[in-house]
Amino acid sequence: RDDSEVSRLHASGRGPTGLGSELSACLHEALDLAEETGRAFDPTIGRLIEVWDLRGSGRLPSNSELDRARRRSGAFLVHHDAATRVARLRRGVRLDFGGIGKGQALDRAAERLRAAEVESALLDFGGQLVAIGAPPGEDAWTVALASPVDRAEPAVTLHLRDASLATSSQSERRLAVDDVVLGHVLDPRRGHPLPVVGSASILCDSAARADALSTACLVLGRQRCLELAERWNVGVCWLEPSSTSDFVQHNDSRFREQLFAFPGNNS
C-alpha cells in the first residue's frame, strides 16, 4: 500500500522518521530476531524480493542486479531508537515484514481478547495458530500440521493451549521461471530463494516469535534448527518428503510433549 506507514518510511529516504507504536515495536522485535538468528530471518530483504519478483510472477535477476540488492539488505543498515520510536534507513533499504507480520497481528488480536476476559479461543491466520485456553470441557485445542507433500492432508496432530504454532514451507507458492523453480522463502544471507522442500514448525508463547523463527528454521535447515530449539526455548517440528513414505518427521522434546498422535514416520 502506497499510503501505509512502512511506505512513508521508505519514501523518507535517509532522514529520521517517527514511527507509530505498533510499527516501532514490530521493527524492534524483527531486528532483534535478525541478530538472534544470524540473519536467517531478516526484515530488510525487500530489495531482494523485488529483484526476484517473488511477490509477482518471478524472474531471474542478473548478477549485477543481485549484487546491488544484496548491498541494500542487512539489519545493520537500519537505525532504530525504540525509546523515541525514530528510524532511519540507509542505502535505500526496503523493509519486508512478511516473515513476522502475521504473528504480530495474531499477538495483538490475542491481547484484545484476553483484555476482554475471553478465556477460550483459537485464532487461525493463514495457517498460523494462537490458542487461548482450551475448548469447554477439554484440556487443550487439538490442531494439525499439514503434510509437506499435500497441504490438504493433516500430517501431525497435537495439543495446543496458551501458545502459538507457526509453519514455514515451500509448498504453498512456487514460481517457475525459464524451467527454474523458485520457492517463495528467501535466504537473506545468500540472497537466493531456498531450494529446500519441506516444512519447519515452531511452537512457542509468542506468535510473532514463532512466525519469524519458523522462517529462520527453514533457512537454517533441519539439523541446525533442532540444535537451536533449546537455546530459543521453542518446540521444533521438521517435516520432509521421503522416498519410502509421504514424509519423515523430526522434532525436539518440547514439541513431542504436545503431540497427540504420530501419523507417518518419526525420527
Image (spheres, grey):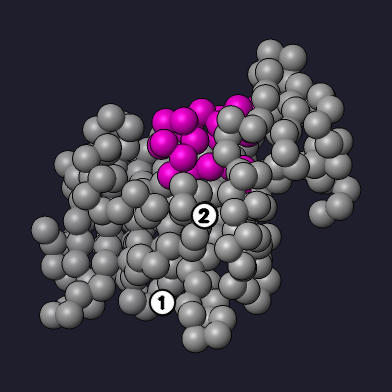
In the image, residue 44 above or below residue 199 = above
Binning the other alpha carbons within 10 Å of mark 2 as few (below 14), some (14 to 19) or many (20 upward) gives some
Q: Could you say where residue 222 lies in the image, as x and y percent from the top left?
A: 26, 53
Amino acid under label 1? Ala
- Image mark for residue 152: 1
Q: Which residue is at 67% across, 23% downward?
A: 80
The answer to whether residue 97 is visible is no
User: In the rendered view, would you say 23 is above or below 203?
Assistant: above
**In this view, 60 is above or below 42:** below
Q: Classify residue 37 as left or right of residue 24.
A: left
Quadrant placement of the N terminus: bottom right
| Quarter placement of the C terminus | bottom left
Q: What SS does tag 2 mark?
A: loop
Q: Are marks 1 and 2 in contact (CB under 8 Å)?
A: no
Question: Which residue carries the number 2 mark?
Answer: 191
Res 204 visible: yes
Q: Residue at x 41, y 36 (%)?
A: 38
Q: Tell me the amino acid under the disc marked 2.
A: Gly
Residue visible at 86% across and 36% down in the picture: 12
In this rendered view, identify the residue nearer to me: 65 or 33. 65
Q: Position of residue 166 (x, y in %)?
A: 43, 51
39 part of magenta stretch: yes
Per the model, the C-alpha gap separating discs 1 and 2 is 31 Å
Q: Which residues are magenta?
A: 25-45
Q: In screen coordinates, is 93 left or right of 160?
A: right
